[in-house]
Amino acid sequence: MAQVSSISNEQSPTAKSIILKISRYNPEHDESSQFMEFNVKYEKWTTVLEAILDVKKHYDHSVAVRYSCRQATCGSCGMIINGKPRLACFTKISELDSNVVTVEPMNNFPVIRDLAVKFEKLFDTHQKIKPYLIRDDTELISDEKEFLQTPEEVEQYIQFANCIKCGLCNSACPTMATDSSFVGPQALAQAYRYVADSRDKGKDSRLKIIDDSHGIWRCHFAGSCSQVCPKGVDPAMGIQLLRGYMLGFRS
Amino acid sequence: MSKDEHREGIGGMINPRRYGIERVAYLLMRLSGLGLLAYFIGHIYETSNILRGQVGWNEFMEMISTTEGHIIMSIVIAMCVFHTVNGVRVMLGHGGVGVGKPTRPDYPYDPASQNYRHKIGIYSAMVLAAVAMMYGLAVMFGE
Amino acid sequence: MVDSIEFDLIICGSGLAGLRAAIAAAKKGPHLKIGIVSKVQVMRSHSVSAEGGTAAVLFEDEGDTIESHVYDTVKGSDFLADQDVAERLCVEMPQEIHQLDHWGMPWSRRDDGRIDQRNFGGYSFPRATYASDKVGFFEMQTLYDTCQKFENIEYLNEWFVTSIIHDGKRFMGVTAIELGSGTFYTIKGKALIIATGGAGRLYSFSTYALSSTPDGLDMGLRAGMALKDMEFVQFHPTGILPSGILITEGARGEGGYLLNNKGERFMKTYAAGKMELAPRDIVSRSIMTEIQEGRGFKHETGVDCMKLDLRHLGDEKIKEKLGGIREISIKFSGQDPAKDLLDIRPVCHYMMGGLHTDIDGATEIQGVWAAGEAACNSVHGSNRLGANSTSECIVWGKITGELAIDYIQKNESTNPWPHHLVAAEEKRIYDGIFRGNGDVNPYEIRQQLTDTMNDKAYVYKNETNLIEGLKTIRDLKKQTWKHVDDKAKEYNTNFANVMELDSMFRVAEIVLLGAINRKESRGAHARTDYPKRDDANFLHHTLAYYDPTEPIMKTHPVTITKYQPVERKY
Amino acid sequence: MRESTIMKIHYGTALAAVALVAVHILMRLTMGYAESLEYENVLANYKFVPYAIMLELILVLLAVHGFNGLRVILLELKQGRLYEKAVSYGCLVAMIGLIAYGSRTIIMTNMGMA
Ligand SMILES: Cc1cc2nc3c(=O)[nH]c(=O)nc-3n(C[C@H](O)[C@H](O)[C@H](O)COP(=O)(O)OP(=O)(O)OC[C@H]3O[C@@H](n4cnc5c(N)ncnc54)[C@H](O)[C@@H]3O)c2cc1C
Ligand code: HEM
Ligand code: SF4
Ligand code: F3S
Ligand code: FES
């Protein structure tokens, strides 16, 4: 019977190989991080995450890396790949066009170990901007129906709702590089997501929260956040539009 | 930076190479702002020489009418023009002008805020700055 | 002394079911402490991958009825669903859709501003509520964000729960390892909701997140609960090659065709009435039959496949309604659905089985509920209809969340904390696994195990294969893979991976045993040696209990209220 | 002050300065750069009250704008309650200082004390 056998690419004749340099750091005994090099095979569809997991499987079980969905929807696998923040599962080795692939933990997040970083700060700031509809009747009582919303109204915010909280934007932002209190593009884009939702009535309270000395004003429209976002969220746009409200350009 | 923060630090903030021209503009904006502030402070001090009367003023004018003085002056002109033009662009951007409209993003995702309008703004700020600098040099050395 | 923390309600798992439960509980018991414990960061749960839709009857004014949803579900289940449970799902669902809307869910809309719905396999009305093709993602976001409102919810990100502690009858707490620091904890609680999701990573070709392993199921099993109907594993017809990532049924719901190498829409031979929108078990079998009869394609990896044609939908419609799968197919397979045919084949996608619960989601241990894919309240019988699973997660998330709070408010436990059980668990983990030794690579064993499941218990099964599979797995289990080479404390994923593998053996064995015992074909369980459904002997659920030597297999009756089993035709 | 107010001032001062600085620089170009800087001409300018007022305005606007810009950069570089307080007040003091110093020049020159 023609059953599937595992679809692995280990012995395939079309496989090529690259050097994968993984940044290693174990807080128990390392002063600073060091690179370890591995020779890995890849096919044209092999992602950086698959290559790392291949290393973990065959060469060194102890590589610490966060991953789950492997399809760019859970936001686990952000890291610096060849110098830029990217999702490991959404970066094919073939598209990097390089014989050496270097992976490091994301900048601007505390490192737990190797490639895994702490996200608590990002989760906290996300919570701080009140990421939910604000109005009196959010809780359904009896058989109410939906709040009406036209497709055009959905289009006003859907882009920003695509955020997977991967943190790449926060890792790329120049303000984030030195400002540990900055809310960051991820949370600001989410503030805009809710402000722009026609069902929401919480604009003023949200604007108040981000109007802080380390709030929205610390964005200088450097745009790096939008350039690295794997989901097309374009935080830079959201932030400027949001600021448009605060400057009275928009209402 | 320490691992418990792992911030990129000033190096990361300044490094303009990894990202687009927007990041270069960001850096130049800061540098020109600081440069102008430094010049501005100097300028206020400089003009106070007028209180020392004609002699004092002339002494001072001679001091800055050197080649170095002119070069510094022309850099100031460039900074001023870049900072002003880019400043206007950034302000428009901050007000939500020309940053694109929210829509459903389609793969491959090109961020609408990183659009040609703003890129043109940045490049024209640079070109104008260069032109102004040339002009300044021509005027100052042309005598 | 083992570190200990305490909650009133512990929710293990942070997918749709877990988060919905948390909100229901937080609302009902504003003064109670609720802890969401998850081995991934809360919002990274597998549920974010759900694509196509959530089933609910929203347009009764346009001819849809609850009754029809119930019947479709029961018929889809090949009459193994408990019909009272199916009814409960369908009745509760509409208001849940509206509740999600009130919480900010970005549902796709009709021009008049109402929530839109699309066609899905096995339904007699287009009732899959959708948000582009990222339904699960947006639902997770809505629930996670709504959770942020409640101050009594705490998030234990990346805590691996290892066992359930109870006094023989009543729940008392769980043991867990905080992955970030590597610390072993006991978490005491008055009630527990298990929402650990499916275990599709038992198969190597799978749509599931890499974290969807059976450790949650296994933990219930070891605590004495039964696993029910584990032999029913759903294979989704359209997993894209080579990754196995899902191409949603919504693609066919929007009008996509399945083509064989003759260029025919072969579904006309198998389900002329519903064509590509027949239930998943039927479409998957049809694909495999076509392949076996030589009408398939070969993918460049050498694997047999079939083609999915979306080109006629046009680029704009694909971008609007199927943006996620467009991204997936272009990025991961280099195929643009507006221009190319997609290479697909049936892929492990859902487990109808799970922890045995009653209609309320209550398990056999007092104070423990199970919800979502981890639970088997028998709403899906032997085959789940697409879009009914996210519905199930949401409905039973809410039900169990509320019931657990009721229970906590009524019951006060006085029994002493069973330290010996914690000690035993610590020994099992640290002596048995962490400090174990051996020279067999556990990752290779895991690969072999999941390959075996793929080979021997795929869309079509037979006695020989299943028995071979069982033997292979038992052989693998005996090898010396139980060791963790990474000795570090912080973020030791090697440790977690070996723990997962340990649980995979027990659950894989039950899947295979159940399949061997069920000598009939029903729903997703298709035996070439017993091709007919056999209501006389097998119209019952399978239960499996833990035993150190071999699982104890039992049966459990099916609840039939209105619909007597008839032949299933589409 | 709310950050939004401060930043509105930052942008407002910048905008206003654009116009005024333009005038200020154009004055340099009305009669040839070097000539414009000759003592008599400069002095004459200072004595011309509207021009002196304009200079004063530029002084205030740019000092406010420039030192706030500095404050922004410093706030982003390092954090901490004490540091941030020091930066804010430091910049304010420097700003006032510069304005005072510049005003002295303008006023004294205007009143013919040079
Ligand atoms: C690709 C794909 C697409 C799908 N699309 C649809 C669809 O369109 N419509 C539909 O109705 N259904 C769909 N389904 C099915 C549906 O997504 C799942 O059944 C549902 O998401 C399961 O949710 P859950 O809450 O039960 O568990 P999950 O979301 O799987 O979450 C499980 C949770 O348990 C945690 N956990 C597990 N083990 C442990 C442990 N030992 N300790 C601590 N935490 C643990 C995990 O961290 C995770 O948080 C799809 C499934 C797949 C695979
Ligand atoms: C006259 C035209 C000017 C305009 C239109 C202008 C505009 C701006 C704008 C919009 C910013 C904010 C940038 C951001 O937050 O992204 C800024 C910053 C700044 N400006 Fe100006 N400015 C002008 C002149 C000056 C002058 C003359 C000085 C010096 C005294 C100066 C000093 C600064 C400084 C130090 C900053 C902070 C830099 C930064 O945050 O990037 N500016 N300017
Ligand atoms: S905005 Fe984009 S880059 Fe930032 S967290 Fe969200 S998805 Fe990631
Ligand atoms: S990179 Fe940072 S500066 Fe603003 S536009 Fe993005 S948040
Ligand atoms: S693994 Fe989920 S985003 Fe990469």
Image (spheres, coloured by chain):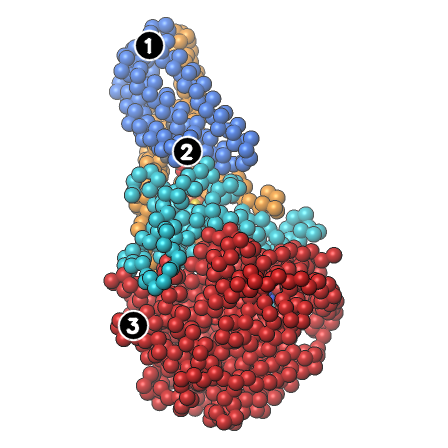
Chain under callout 2: D
Q: Which chain has been coloured red in this picture? A: C
Chain A: colour as depicted:
cyan
CA gap, disc 2 and disc 1: 37 Å
In the displayed structure, D36 sits above or below C451; it is above
Which chain gets the blue colouring? D
Viewer-nearest of discs 2 and 1: 2
Q: List the single residue furthest toward the left.
A: C112
Kindly indicate whether the residue at mark 3 contacts the one at mark 2 (C-beta within 8 angstroms). Answer: no
Quarter of the image where the C terminus of chain B is located:
top left
How many numbered circles does the render carry?
3
Q: CA distance from mark 1 to mark 3?
A: 84 Å
User: What colour denotes chain B?
Assistant: orange
User: Which type of secondary structure does the marked residue at label 1 adopt?
Assistant: helix
Foreground residue among C251 and C120? C120
Q: Which residue is mark 1?
A: D110
Residue C496 appears in view = no
User: Callout 3: helix, strand or loop?
Assistant: helix
Hey, what amino acid is under mark 3? Answer: Glu
Q: Which mark is residue D2?
A: 2
Nearer to us in this view, B43 or A113: A113
Give the answer, above or below, for where C480 lies relative to B85: below
Q: Image point 49% across, 37% down: which residue?
A: D76
The answer to whether residue C17 is left or right of residue C465 is left
Question: Residue at 38% across / 85% down in the picture?
Answer: C261
Q: Residue at x 27, y 15 (%)?
A: D50
